[in-house]
Structure formats: C-alpha cells, structure tokens
Image (cartoon, rainbow, N blue to C red):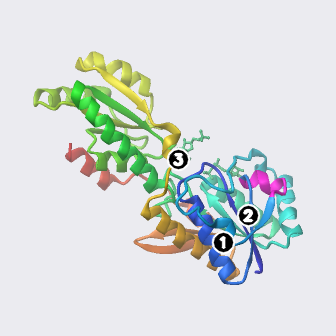
Amino acid sequence: MKKIAILTSGGDAPGMNAAIRACVRRALNFGLEVYGVERGYEGLVNNEIFQMNSQSVCDIIQRGGTILKSARCLDFKLPEVRKTAADNLKKHGIEGLIVIGGDGSFTGAKLLSDEQGINVVGIPGTIDNDLAYTDFTLGFDTAVNTVLWAINSLRDTMTSHERVSIIKVMGRHCGDIALYSGICGGAEFILVPEIPYDIKDIAEAINKNKARGKLSNIIIFAEGAGDVDKILSCLPVMTGLDTKLTTLGHIQRGGTPTMFDRMLAARFGARAVDVLIDGQTNRVVGYKNNATIDMNITEALAIKKEINRELYDIATTLC
Ligand code: ADP
Ligand code: F6P
C-alpha cells in the first residue's frame, strides 16, 4: 500500500476535520502518499481527487465541518457509477480508501471493495450515534454539548415566564442525542423514537410539577419521535401553561469539536491508516470500552442499534 485517499460522506459532523488531519499525518509519517477526495462519493465519481501534504491539514483540528466537503450521491447505488469511481482511484494509483461517514457511506465503501478491489476502511462520523458496533461516533459528543448550551439558555427564560419548553433535536431514527442531552441538561421529559409515550401522561406529570412549585418543564423531543406539532397544540390545553417549541436544527452539526471528539478523531484516524497499511479491507474502526477497535463492515452494520434502557430508566427517576 503506497497511496491512500480520504473522503467524508453523508451529513457532516464536528471532528471530521480532526480525523482527516489524523489520517493524513499518520499516513505521511509511515511514508504513504495521501490524496483527498472532495464532496464524498460525488467527487470520487467526478475525479475531484488531489494530493495532500502535512500543510494541507494545518489549523483544522479545531474547526467543525469538513475541509473535504460532503455530499449525498444517490447514483453511487449504481454499479456502473461505482466502477467509474474506482477507475478514477486506479488512475492515480490509489489502492486504499478511508471513508468518514455513517452506515450509508459504509455500505457504499463495501460495494467498492467487493466489486472493484479497492481496500476500504470506515471511520464512524455522524452526530446521530446510530451505529451499534461503536460506543460513540465522531461528532456526537460535540452535538450533545451544543444541545446542552441551548437547554441552559432555554431553562433561564422558561423559568422566568413559568413556561414549558419543547426542544427538538436531531438524530434521525436514533434517540441518543435526546437521551444524553436530556439527562445531562436535567430535562423533565425525554421523547425518543425507540420508546412509546402518551401525551396524557406528560400533561399529568407537568400538572403535578406545577402543584409542587416547579417553575419550568423541559421536554427534549428527538426528531424521529412522532408529531411534535400535536404535542405543541395539546399541552397548553391540558396544562394551562404557555408552551414554546425550539427546533435546534443544523446548529447541532457545526462548532468546534470537544476534547472527546478530537481524541476519537486522533484514535480513529491512526487506526484506519494502520488497518490499510496492514493490507486489510472492509473494516470499520470504532470505540468500545475505552479502546479503539476495528471490525468487519458487514458484521458491524448487522448489529442492531438499541436505546440504552439503563440510561433511560435513570432519566425517568431524576426529574
Ligand atoms: P450516512 O453515511 O451518514 O448514513 P447517507 O445514508 O446519506 O449518510 O449515505 C451517504 C452516501 O453513501 C449516499 O449519498 C451514497 O452516496 C452512499 N450510499 C448510501 N447507501 C448506499 C448503498 N446502498 N449503496 C451504495 N452507496 C450508498
Ligand atoms: O445524520 C445526521 C443528520 O443531521 C440527522 O440527524 C438529520 O436527520 C439529517 O442528518 C439531516 O440531514 P440534512 O442535513 O440533509 O438536512
């Protein structure tokens, strides 16, 4: 393995830049040539491939987003499109590819390896934390800290006005952003896609909170947890309390990565390069019990993501 390339794909996540830096510097240190691919698989198909050096990644460790840019390329599901992508890599003499993204990006990488013989390794980069094989994905910790900042501010004003605050967070089908930010932000209610809830129970609990003198109630609502507008219209009628919805949106995807995400980036980047140097393919790197791991892509994606019931149970007893 003499030449490798790196791309970022799917939704961006804080820490992707730190991971790109780690991959580039580790690979250069081991004497490899390193290439960057712009705009994920779209750039691979369009031959947007350029050589990187140590200087290409200076001053990016602290920056959110991805200097390689990211894209969603639906055409990559077509075998002939993947062949074009592989031909572009081969023209540059590139034998190994590091893909930083989520499960969709990993699926594309595996197909590229199986059909075209490119060695691939995936780094889990998504704020959603929706990959079960790893305890944490890159960007999740930063996103949760951004939500915590919002909860703190909203708590101040909701308390002054004795209101209910519904804070809608991202996560697609996964409730982890809501669960972790809800626990650490002291939310009264956490609504996630994985666990059913009843608006009547929430209203009843809010009324009890009011009776014991609680000045504000915060509901963290994960985007996959149903119809937020229905809750917004029902709750004021059932509680008599003014209720405000704040949708945090893409603010959760940006910002300077936390120490935890930068450390994950360093460890993931180094491990991914090592896996390629070792001649392996169809691997993903991850983090399990405070250790860096790598495993087969298919096995990793087959593990079903479930909500952490222990954490959810703790949450219900702390408000
Ligand atoms: P994520 O990687 O965060 O899960 P997406 O699901 O949007 O994000 O996938 C990112 C990209 O990966 C897609 O735009 C596409 O280029 C590629 N991809 C996703 N699913 C497949 C698939 N089944 N086959 C080939 N490529 C895929
Ligand atoms: O996967 C990351 C994520 O931010 C999800 O939480 C969200 O559902 C989705 O991407 C939003 O995608 P887009 O940036 O394309 O609107």
- Mark 1 and mark 3 lie on one chain; the one further toward the N terminus is 1
What residue appears at the point 76 percent right and 50 percent down from the top-left corner? Answer: 77
Which of 19/274 is in front? 19
- Above or below, comparing residue 48 to residue 118 in the picture: above
Judge whether residue 111 is colored magenta. no
**What secondary structure predominates along the stretch shown in magenta?**
helix
Per the image, the residue denoted by label 3 is: 253
Callout 3 amino acid: Arg
Which quarter of the rendered picture does the N terminus lie within? Answer: bottom right
Q: Position of residue 98 (x, y in %)?
A: 68, 67
Q: In the displayed image of the protein, which residue is found farthest to the left?
A: 212
Q: Position of residue 10 (x, y in %)?
A: 64, 50
What residue appears at the point 48 percent right and 41 percent down from the top-left corner? Answer: 170
Ligand 2 location (quadrant): top right
- Mark 1 and mark 2 lie on one chain; the one further toward the N terminus is 1
Which of 20/202 is in front? 20
Q: CA–CA distance between discs 1 and 2?
A: 9 Å
Per the image, the residue denoted by label 2 is: 36
What residue appears at the point 66 percent right and 54 percent down from the top-left corner? Answer: 9
Which quarter of the rendered picture does the C terminus lie within? Answer: top left
The residue range painted magenta reads: 40-48
Q: Respond yes or no on whether mark 3 lies under 8 Å from ligand 2.
A: yes
| Secondary structure under the numbered disc 1 in the rendered image | helix
Determine which of the numbered discs, if any, sits on residue 24 in the image.
Answer: 1
